[in-house]
Image (spheres, helix red, strand yellow):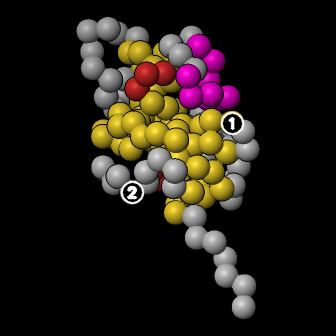
């Protein structure tokens, strides 16, 4: 999954995000980080992406894998759909995902490479 397609200073368009950034907005890459991302099913039945630093297994002797129940332990990535202490079940694991810190409308967001696209300015004839 390592794409390395974006670098600090690049302009990007936000394609999708559930942390408050608006799809279609254009932002700037500030930094890059590589980690694991998980799709979790929350108690209300919805599905969301969360990253490794924000969750802990409810059984510390188990690695986090598909089927593991996890507890939200941090909200460093501004997940409005989960509060610290909420439980969710892991349904997909993606390792070595590129995350980018993006500045958009004076706010910072951590977005994965599949939530971003290159910004291509429109041409006017």
Q: Tell me the element at label 1.
A: strand
Vertical side of 48 occupied by 88: above or below:
above
Asked whether 110 falls inside the magenta stretch, the response is no
Residue 118's spot in the image, x, y percent? Answer: 52, 63
Q: Tell me the element at label 2.
A: loop
Tell me the residue at 52%/41% (across/down).
Answer: 30
Q: Residues within 10 Å of mark 2 (few under 14, many from 20)?
A: few
Extreme residue toward the bottom, this view: 125
State the residue position of label 1. Answer: 107
Residue 37: which quarter of the image? top left
Vertical side of 101 occupied by 67: above or below:
above
Residue 72's spot in the image, x, y percent? Answer: 52, 17
Q: Residues within 10 Å of mark 1 (few under 14, many from 20)?
A: few
Extreme residue toward the front, this view: 9
For the image, the number of numbered tags is: 2
Residue 53: which quarter of the image? top left
Q: Does residue 65 appear to the left or right of 84 in the view shown? A: left
Q: Does residue 11 appear to the left or right of 98 in the view shown? A: right
Examine the residues drawn in magenta and state their main secondary structure. Answer: loop
- Would residue 52 be seen by someone viewing this image from the given angle? yes
Asked whether 78 falls inside the magenta stretch, the response is yes
State the residue position of label 2. Answer: 5
How far apart marks 2 and 1 lie (CA) works out to 22 Å
Q: Which residues are magenta?
A: 76-84
Q: Are marks 2 and 1 in contact (CB under 8 Å)?
A: no
Residue 26: which quarter of the image? bottom right
Residue 7's spot in the image, x, y percent? Answer: 43, 51
N-term mark: 2 or 1? 2
Residue 59's spot in the image, x, y percent? Answer: 34, 9
Tell me the residue at 62%/42% (across/down).
Answer: 103
Vertical side of 59 occupied by 18: above or below:
below
């Amino acid at each position: 999954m390592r794409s390395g397609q974006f670098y600090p200073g690049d302009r990007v368009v936000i394609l999708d995000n559930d942390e408050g950034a608006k799809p279609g907005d254009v932002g700037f890459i500030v930094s890059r980080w590589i980690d694991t991302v998980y799709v979790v099913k929350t108690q209300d039945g919805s599905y969301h992406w969360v990253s490794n630093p924000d969750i802990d297994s409810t059984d510390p002797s188990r690695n986090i894998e598909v089927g593991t129940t996890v507890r939200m332990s941090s909200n460093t990535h501004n997940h409005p759909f989960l509060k610290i202490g909420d439980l969710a079940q892991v349904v997909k694991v993606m390792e070595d995902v590129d995350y980018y810190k993006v500045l958009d409308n004076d706010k910072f967001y951590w977005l994965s490479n599949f939530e971003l696209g290159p910004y291509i300015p429109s041409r006017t004839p």
